[in-house]
């Protein structure tokens, strides 16, 4: 049986890792959907899809399961989101999620959805990890070693700090892609 688990993985952390460990007990193969694949270089989504594929793939190699990491770009039409996911992914028999919207969308599409307990959610949460990276607090203990290696390889902490900085000389909300006046 093949399962599907989607997350933004910004970054992949020990909560995700524990969920994958639980899922691996129920399925023979696992598709990991890298959600919001087109988003990167922002405070909420600092890492690229490719970087998150590396984080997930290297971390999941800890488990004895065949896995596939598949980038899934956002689609702002919930009614066709499941078919979009299915078109981007190897076929799967069951989806795993704790997100109420994702559960509803898969349910409406006739896909079995299973939930898993969340682990230490007050700390194992992407916003908390990114905040710790920004403030210089401990984040390494909250992610698998493979994720630490990827973040260090790509200078991820420096990136998060830079993309979270505001331009004190320019108007609020300006970005690098807008035309200068």
Image (cartoon, grey):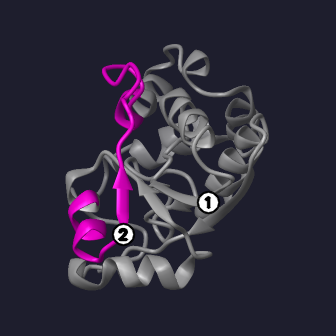
Neighbours of disc 1 within 10 Å: few (<14), some (14-19), many (20+): few
**Which residue sits at x=41%, y=36%?**
126
**Crowding near the residue tagged with mark 2, few <14, some 14–19, many ≥20 C-alpha atoms within 10 Å:** some
Judging by the rendered image, the residue that carries numbered circle 2 is 111
| Horizontal relation, residue 112 to residue 46: left or right | left
Residue 25: percent from the left, percent from the top?
61, 37
Nearer the observer, 17 or 40: 17
Query: Which residue is rendered at x = 57% and y = 69% of the image?
Result: 71
Label 1 secondary element: loop
The quarter in which the C terminus is drawn is: bottom left
At 39% from the left and 37% from the top, the residue drawn is 116
Q: Which residues are magenta?
A: 103-128
Measured as percent of width and height from the top left, residue 163 is found at 45, 49
Q: Is residue 114 magenta?
A: yes
Identify the mark nearer the N-term, 2 or 1. 1
Q: Which residue is mark 1?
A: 1
Query: In front here: 51 or 72?
Result: 72
């Amino acid at each position: 049986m093949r399962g599907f688990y989607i997350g933004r993985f910004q970054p992949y952390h020990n909560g995700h890792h524990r969920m994958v460990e639980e899922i691996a007990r129920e399925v023979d193969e696992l598709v990991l959907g890298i959600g919001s694949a087109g988003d990167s270089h922002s405070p909420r989504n600092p890492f690229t899809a490719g970087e998150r594929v590396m984080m997930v793939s290297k971390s999941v190699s800890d488990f004895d399961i065949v896995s596939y990491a598949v980038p899934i770009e956002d689609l702002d039409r919930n009614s066709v989101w499941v078919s979009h996911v299915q078109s981007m992914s190897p076929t799967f028999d069951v989806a795993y999620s704790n997100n109420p919207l994702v559960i509803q969308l898969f349910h409406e599409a006739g896909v079995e959805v299973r939930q898993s307990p969340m682990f230490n959610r007050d700390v194992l949460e992407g916003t908390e990890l990114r905040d710790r990276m920004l403030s210089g607090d401990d984040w390494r203990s909250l992610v698998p070693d493979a994720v630490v290696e990827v973040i260090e390889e790509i200078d991820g902490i420096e990136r998060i700090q830079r993309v979270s900085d505001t331009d004190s000389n320019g108007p609020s909300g300006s970005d690098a892609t807008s035309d200068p006046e």
